[in-house]
Amino acid sequence: MRRYGKNTDEDDIRQRPNRKGTRPRTSIRPKHEDAVEGMVLTVDRGRLTCLVDDRTVTAMKARELGRKAAVVGDRVSLVGDLSGEKDTLARIVRIGERSSVLRRTADDDDPYERVVVANADQLAIVTALADPEPRPRLIDRCLVAAYDGGLSPLLVLTKSDLAPPDALLEMYGALGVPHVVTTREEFVDGVAAERVHEHLKGRTTAFVGHSGVGKTTLVNALVPADRRRTTGVVNAVTGRGRHTTTSALALPLNDKEGGWVIDTPGVRSFGLHHVDPSRVILAFPELVPGTENCPRACSHDEPDCALDAFVAEGHADPARLFSLRRLLATRERREGD
């Protein structure tokens, strides 16, 4: 049945609404000069908790940011309701430039990298000397991720009353990584937290480690006002713990020097698909000059690598070159191998 007469014009024609919107596309984004600066404390199902001045604000990412995601530690710019009151929601309109990133992939053949933490200065790698057994391959992978992302590593060895730390410390001695060795009793009386705290003053430190090593227990001792659940138990059959931390969380150190602690979920693998060997070697500054005569795209672990001659001529310690190559080799070996 015809709805219009013979002499219709465009104004008489009803148009079906465009489901994708009728506004023309533009590459011009709002500037939001009135946006307020904040820091992302945690992310949970698309909602981000941010610290703005002295209050926490719940926010979501603005549509104009596209696929760019904000992570814990990011400095962001927010607009909207910044009161922090219940049922209010702000909007993140800008993500600041990152000074460092801790990244990982699910596995070595996974091309999709995940940024775990942004703008941290230090990576505290927590591992138990027994119950569960230490996993040097995982430690190596965390070290590579730290060097690649611009973080300084700190090795925290727990449960030294169950097994001596000598062998593990010898393995990493040539790297010059600072370390703290603690016992279970020191965890209880707070001595462990005090000794670790000396390395955290005025810095933003991300804590990483597989489940059951005491990572979250240590974080709770460092920041007692914000305790996280620590009910993980080491499985007697697999020797692995149960994850008790499911999302990264930034917590402030309440002392004069300041600083932040970022607790991350326990990891069972640490993929390094994204790592560029040329960035890892920057953590070995005495070896960098020796790469000038390396062939293009040298992996620094092949017959024509110039580092062999460089070290043979006495310009660097052979143990340092061995450590570099051991770390780079972890990119080719799965963590369980």
Image (cartoon, rainbow, N blue to C red):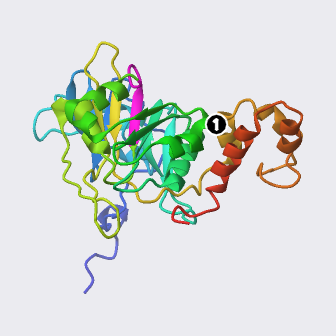
Hey, which quadrant is residue 198 in on the image?
A: top left
Q: Is residue 50 above or below residue 105?
A: above
At label 1, counting other C-alpha atoms closer than 10 Å, the crowd grade (few under 14, some 14-19, many 20 or more) is some
Q: Residue at x 31, y 64 (%)?
A: 17
Can residue 235 be seen? yes
In the image: residue 60, left or right of residue 208: left
Residue 182 drawn above or below residue 11: above
The answer to which image quadrant residue 283 occupies is: top right
Instruction: Residue 204: say if magenta.
Output: yes
Is 56 displayed left or right of 258 in the figure?
left
Which is nearer the eye, 73 or 175?
A: 175
Residue farthest to the bottom, as pictured: 1
* Residue 12 in the image, given as x and y percentages of width and height: 30, 65
Q: Give amino acid for label 1.
A: Ala
Task: For residue 49, say whether it is visible.
Answer: no
**Residue 21 vs residue 142, the one in the foreground:** 142
**Does residue 261 appear to the left or right of 336 in the view shown?**
left
Of 277 and 23, which appears nearest the observer? 277
- Picture coordinates of residue 207 (x, y %)? 38, 40
